[in-house]
Amino acid sequence: MTVCRHCFISGRVQGVVFRATTARRAIGLKVTGYAKNLPDGRVEVLACGEAEAVNELCDWLWQGPPAAKVSDVVIREVECLDVPPVFTVR
């Protein structure tokens, strides 16, 4: 079953290769969606795919790449209306 989760990651998450590392993880898990920097310093991630793979990616967001320092991750389930065909960095 395909699920989609909209995630907002706070902390030191910009300028530490967070989006690119998230994309590599997502692609390896066959999760589609995107990762993008927000003006307020957070990273936004949309993750769509099989529930187990999306759960694994969402759990990893709490860690991030080695240079990141994640302070909070807010995750909400969203409808899978326009599921992206691939995972992209925006």
Image (cartoon, rainbow, N blue to C red):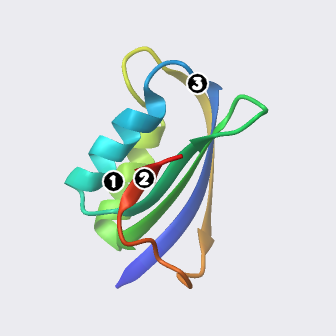
Task: Give the percent coordinates (x, y) of residue 62.
Answer: 48, 36
Return the residue at label 3: 14
In this view, the mark in front (1 or 2): 2
Cα distance between the residues tagged 3 and 1:
21 Å
Cα distance between the residues tagged 2 and 3:
16 Å
Residue 65 versus residue 33 in the image, above or below: above
Return the residue at label 2: 88
> What amino acid is at disc 2?
Thr
Residue 80's disc is none
Task: Looking at the image, tell me whether mark 1 or mark 2 is earlier in sequence order.
Answer: 1
Instruction: Describe residue 89's horizontal placement relative to residue 78 as left or right.
Output: left
Disc 1 secondary structure class: helix
Q: Which residue is at the far right?
A: 40
Residues at circles 1 and 2 in contact by the CB criterion of under 8 Å = no
> What amino acid is at disc 3?
Gln
In this view, the mark in front (2 or 3): 2
Disc 2 secondary structure class: strand
